[in-house]
Image: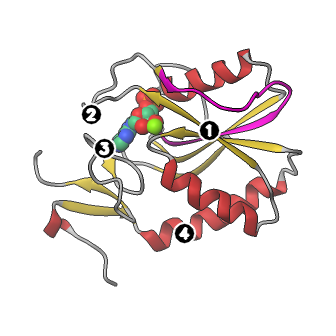
Amino acid sequence: MHEETASNGLDVIFSAETIAERIRHLAEEISARNIEQLLVVAVLKGSFVFAADLIRAMHQAGMAPEVDFLTLSSYRKSKVSSGKVEILRDLDLSVDNRNVMLIDDVLDSGRTLAFAKDLISARGAKSILTCVLLDKRLPRAVDVHADFCAFDCPDEFVVGYGMDVAHRYRELPFVGRLVSGD
Ligand code: IMP
Ligand code: MG
């Protein structure tokens, strides 16, 4: 094992190997649904690493999705949700009459995913599935659930594997928690 530890101020929660193995199975689960002409929408920025790995695993599982990106903001520079979700960069593609699967990093209060679902539904999607890397499984501020989830997540602020605090830690290959008090 050559995992990073508290020495750099982080504890590993899900290692790169654990994530890769889980994503392979998740892609098989998604593939088994036989969704026609799937359009994957990655909710940026936090999901970009997960989405990149998941779509390649989906390819290995025999799928050929179209992919688009939606940049939403709810956390800004703080660790606490502002409660308000904004579109920072919109989709390029039309979702009208499409089977869409939203990919996000963390399902926490549910506001981000609920906002994305409502947006895509209002634009006429035929079906909408949701897929998250981490589900904090807390009481939600809004009622939304993940159809596919890689891992249940402890109720802590996590970073790495695309997720940040103030634009840092996205490059880490694992999901970790900050152990020193910054
Ligand atoms: P929600 O809108 O409260 O469900 O929060 C979801 C969004 O907040 C996610 O898409 C993440 O970008 C961000 N977020 C929530 N919890 C964490 C965390 O522990 N680490 C990093 N980002 C988080
Ligand atoms: Mg996010």
Quadrant assignment for the C terminus: top left
Distance in Å between CA atoms under marks 1 and 3: 19 Å
Could you tell me how far apart the alpha carbons at marks 2 and 1 are, in whole angstroms? 22 Å
Q: Looking at the image, which is closer to me, 96 or 131?
A: 96
> Does label 4 or label 2 sit earlier along the sequence?
4
Ranked by sequence position, the earlier of labels 1 and 3 is 1
Residue under numbered circle 2:
79
Q: Quadrant of the N terminus?
A: bottom left
Magenta range is 87-106
Which element carries disc 3, helix, strand or loop?
loop
| Contact (Cβ within 8 Å) of mark 2 with mark 1 | no
Horizontal and vertical percent position of residue 125 = 79, 25
> Does 139 sit left or right of 58 as displayed?
left
Q: Residues within 10 Å of mark 1 (few under 14, many from 20)?
A: some
* Residue 71 appears in the rendering: yes
Label 3 sits on residue: 156
The percent position of residue 61, horizontal first and vertical second, equals: 77, 66
Give the residue type at disc 2. Lys
CB under 8 Å between discs 4 and 3: no
Q: Which residue is mark 4?
A: 20
For the residue pair 15 and 104, the one nearer the viewer reads as 104
Circle 2 Cα neighbour tier, 10 Å, few/some/many (<14 / 14–19 / ≥20): few
Count numbered badges in the picture: 4
